[in-house]
Each structure stands twice: as structure tokens, then as C-alpha cells.
Image: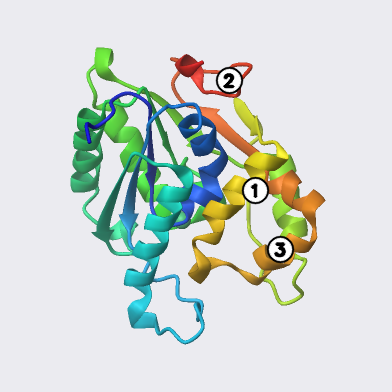
């Protein structure tokens, strides 16, 4: 199959970031024929939650790679680069090498837009922060004519309220320590069908479904409010803004 050039490149840290963080953005593009590529830096082997039932921690890398493959199908991703940097250890990995590898992948895929984690790491996750910084550096290192637009995943006030409410659906939940951005540039609002498609991708990551995400099924209004809302910060001005179709920049 000939590799599609152009489109979006999503640069993430863990299997499930792509679905839980940016599933709507991805679907909105792939459903309109725009190629979306993914880099995932780790197998997520530190995310052991005792799931699926009967599995053991040592099986987790294999389980999560399989889950990512299924999510990639649900999202219709064009390609997935799954790297084996240590989960929970990205900040202590070779930042130069990470940046170089992201830069090489940008050169190969030639995306119009790169989407990565911002300096807040979504909810302060050190892997997200490190991967986001390397992604920023890789984009900045592209020559000006070839440099894609850059966006960061973001959490705004409304989404922070959702996480607060949703995580408290389960009494034992630790909550989710999010610090909302003061301003975001793009908010993608998904319709009910798109939320269901995003949910299908999220559900591929069975080993990572916290109790509150399962409880959320019984609260469709809350699910629409949270899964149906994806804010982004535009880092570079090129291709900034969202068109009437909810597509980023130049793809409408
Ligand atoms: Zn993550």
C-alpha cells in the first residue's frame, strides 16, 4: 500500500493516549479521507491495573500492543510507529534521540499538522511532558518551508469539570489532577455518533479502563459532555483555527 503523505501526525507517549486524548480529532479527519499517522513512544508496560482478568503484569506489553492495533483499526489510522522506550521513564530517556526519531518520522510522513502533548502533559504526566517537549523540538528543527503546524492537546475548564465529575462516579477513585488552560484555540465538539465511535476506540484499551470510565456508560449526558469535547492549543500560527466542518486548518 502506498503511504499517504500529508495529513496529521499524532505524537503520543502511551497506547490509549491517541483514543482517550484525541480520538475525535483523529476520527474527524480519517472519516474525511485525511491520513492520520501515530507515533507511540512506549508499550505502556507500567500501566498494570490487573486487567484483563486472568492476565499477569508480564503480559502487559503484549496486551497493550494488541489493544493499540485494534484501536488503530477503529480510528482508521494510516500507520502506527510503536517504540519501546520505557513507560514512566521517558523523561530519563535520551531526549536528543527521541527528538531525532520524531524529526525523521515527520520527514518521512510529511504531515501538514503535528499534534502532541503540551508542557502541562494533560494532567502533569512526566512521560507526556517529555514527549511533548521532544515533539516541539523536532517540529522546530524542520526547515521553515517543511515545518508542519503544531497543536497541543489541552484541557479547558469545561473538560476539567467533566473529569472531576466523572472520576467521582466511583467512590474509591483518586480523581484526575488536571489543570485547565486559561485559553484554548480550537475546541472540537463531537456529535453523538462520533462519541460512540470514539468510545469504540477507547474500549479497545480494555486493560486501561478505569472504573469511572466503565461507570460513565450509565451517564450518557456526562459522557457526551466529556468524550464529546476536545480542546487544542495552536502552537504555531500556520493553519490555525478550525473550519466549519471541524477540520484543522487546511483540510476542509
Ligand atoms: Zn499517556
Residue 15 screen position, x and y as percent: 41, 57
User: Label 1: how many residues lie within 10 Å, few (<14), some (14-19) or many (20+)?
Assistant: some
Splitting the image into 4 quarters, where does residue 11 fall?
top left
Which residue has dot 2 on it? Answer: 242
Say above or below: 131 vs 103.
below
Residue 125 visible in the picture = yes
> In this view of the protein, which residue sits in the foreground, 88 or 213?
213
Q: Mark 3 or mark 1: which is in front?
A: 1
Which residue has dot 3 on it? Answer: 167
User: Label 2: how many residues lie within 10 Å, few (<14), some (14-19) or many (20+)?
Assistant: some
- Residue ID at (38%, 53%): 13
- Left/right placement of residue 151 relative to residue 134 reads right
Do the numbered discs 2 and 3 sit on residues whose CB atoms are within 8 Å? no
- Residue ID at (19%, 35%): 104
Instruction: State how far apart marks 3 and 1 are (Cα).
Output: 20 Å
Label 1 beta carbon less than 8 Å to ligand 1:
no
- Residue ID at (24%, 32%): 3
Q: Mark 2 or mark 1: which is in front?
A: 1
Residue 179 visible in the picture = no
Instruction: State how far apart marks 2 and 1 are (Cα).
Output: 22 Å
Instruction: State how far apart marks 2 and 3 are (Cα).
Output: 30 Å
Q: Mark 2 or mark 3: which is in front?
A: 2
Say above or below: 49 vs 241.
below
Q: Residue furthest top?
A: 145
Say above or below: 58 vs 24.
below
Q: Determine the secondary structure under disc 3.
A: helix
Mark seen at residue 196: 1
Q: Of the residues under marks 2 and 1, which one precedes in the sequence?
A: 1
Amino acid at each position: 500500500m502506498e503511504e499517504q503523505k500529508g495529513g496529521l501526525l499524532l505524537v503520543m507517549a502511551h497506547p490509549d493516549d491517541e483514543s482517550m486524548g484525541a480520538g475525535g480529532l483523529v476520527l474527524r479527519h480519517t472519516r474525511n479521507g485525511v491520513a492520520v499517522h501515530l507515533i507511540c513512544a512506549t508499550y505502556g508496560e507500567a500501566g498494570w491495573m490487573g486487567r484483563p482478568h486472568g492476565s499477569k503484569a508480564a503480559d502487559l506489553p503484549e496486551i497493550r500492543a494488541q489493544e493499540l492495533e485494534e484501536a488503530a483499526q477503529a480510528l482508521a489510522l494510516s500507520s502506527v510507529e510503536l517504540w519501546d522506550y520505557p513507560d514512566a521513564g521517558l523523561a530519563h530517556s535520551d531526549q536528543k534521540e527521541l527528538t531525532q526519531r520524531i524529526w525523521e518520522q515527520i520527514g518521512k510522513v510529511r504531515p501538514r499538522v503535528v499534534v502532541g502533548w503540551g508542557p502541562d502533559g494533560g494532567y502533569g504526566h512526566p512521560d507526556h511532558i517529555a514527549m511533548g517537549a521532544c515533539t516541539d523540538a523536532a517540529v522546530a528543527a524542520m526547515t521553515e518551508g517543511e515545518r508542519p503546524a503544531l497543536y497541543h492537546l489541552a484541557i479547558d475548564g469545561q473538560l476539567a469539570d467533566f473529569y472531576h465529575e466523572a472520576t467521582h462516579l466511583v467512590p474509591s477513585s483518586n480523581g484526575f489532577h488536571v489543570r485547565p488552560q486559561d485559553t484554548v484555540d480550537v475546541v472540537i465538539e463531537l456529535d453523538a455518533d462520533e462519541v460512540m465511535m470514539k468510545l469504540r476506540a477507547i474500549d479497545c484499551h480494555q486493560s486501561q479502563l478505569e472504573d469511572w470510565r466503565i461507570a460513565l456508560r450509565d451517564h450518557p449526558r456526562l459522557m457526551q459532555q466529556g468524550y464529546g469535547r476536545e480542546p487544542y492549543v495552536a502552537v504555531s500560527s500556520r493553519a490555525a483555527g478550525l473550519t466549519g466542518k471541524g477540520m484543522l486548518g487546511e483540510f476542509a
